[in-house]
Image: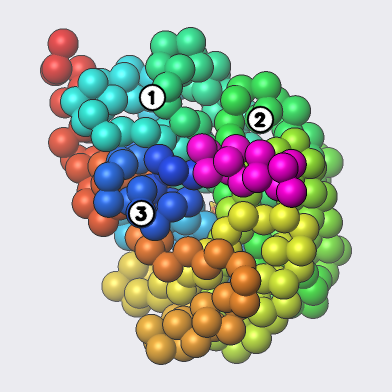
Amino acid sequence: AAQMNLLAADIQKKVQDHPCYSEQAHHHYARMHVAVAPACNIQCNYCNRKYDCSNESRPGVVSEVLTPAQAVKKTLAVAAAIPQMSVLGIAGPGDALANPARTFSVFRELQQRAPDLKLCLSTNGLMLPEYVEQIAAANVDHVTITINCLDPDIGARIYPWIFWDHRRIRGREAAEILIAQQQKGLEMLVARGILVKVNSVMIPGINDEHLKEVSRVVRAKGAFLHNVMPLISDPAHGTFFGLAGQRGPSSEELQALQDACAGDMNMMRHCRQCRADAVGMLGEDRGDEFSMEKVEAME
Ligand code: SF4
Ligand code: SF4
């Protein structure tokens, strides 16, 4: 029991000032994303590459891609201007781990220059097992993996291809590799004591029923939080890569699925599907106040 309490206290410390991991914290703490990761190593059918990674971000706005040096500069400027800033995340606009040199250079630099900032990253999980050591070494203590399925037949309807081992792999085989990497990465992170949030995009008629099983399995493996997000299907932003005409869920359907997944798992219900360059408290986006142009002008 003492060990359990120790564990609980440790987790408490990690979540109390992270606005995404703690519903309470989101009223008091702010987060920012820096868009330093333009490339991606898979294709999701719901992704419209013109916009931010839909794995967390609301499609529709193109983030300004920064160099690592610009990202560090911007982070320090924002942290100086917004005292509630507690978390720096890398969430796109592609995949953080498909751009490892850029991602880890930002983390390394910030570890030195802003040691109080908590670091987090989000990924589709394909390269996760390879980078768990580096993630731990960089003191990243929160990782979000987007896991949409465990069944490769469902996966084949969501992911047309992955880029793996220097070649493009398609269909069921691609989904099988991606799913295996995600699950392995999840287990390795939990074993290292890194908090894991799982994001799932609810796609009606494709993975909606299946997400209940996803929730059970990731919970059993030690994911701390499950965040079921609606597919955002907005005809104004053009067709999605391979889901043309696919509708998103209604808010009733989303809530019913979140309730069904809940059990004793922490469900995130306050996610705002932020942009890859979001700045501020959840629900407010002050990204425009801190464009690179404005940051440069602050000096
Ligand atoms: Fe797009 Fe999927 Fe890559 Fe995100 S992980 S950038 S949604 S293809
Ligand atoms: Fe948090 Fe959701 Fe925004 Fe990511 S997209 S920073 S999980 S609120």
Front one among 12 and 154: 12
Residue 58 in view of the camera: no
The verdict on residue 3 being magenta is yes
- Counting residues from the start of the chain, the first of labels 3 and 2 encountered is 3
Classify mark 2: residues with Cα within 10 Å, few (<14), some (14-19) or many (20+): many
**Label 1: which residue?**
71
Tell me which segment is drawn in magenta: 1-14
Residue 183 in view of the camera: yes
Q: Is mark 1 within 8 Å of ligand 2?
A: no
Residue 233 at x, y percent in the picture: 41, 75
Query: Which residue is at a point 50% across and 17% down the rendered structure image?
Result: 111
**Label 3: which residue?**
24
Amino acid type at mark 3: Gln
How much space separates mark 3 and mark 2, taking CA atoms? 26 Å
Amino acid type at mark 2: Ile
Amino acid type at mark 1: Ala
> Element type at marker 2?
helix
Residue 25 at x, y percent in the picture: 36, 48
Residue 236 at x, y percent in the picture: 29, 73
**Label 2: which residue?**
135
Labelled pair 1, 3 in contact (Cβ < 8 Å) = no
How much space separates mark 1 and mark 2, taking CA atoms? 18 Å
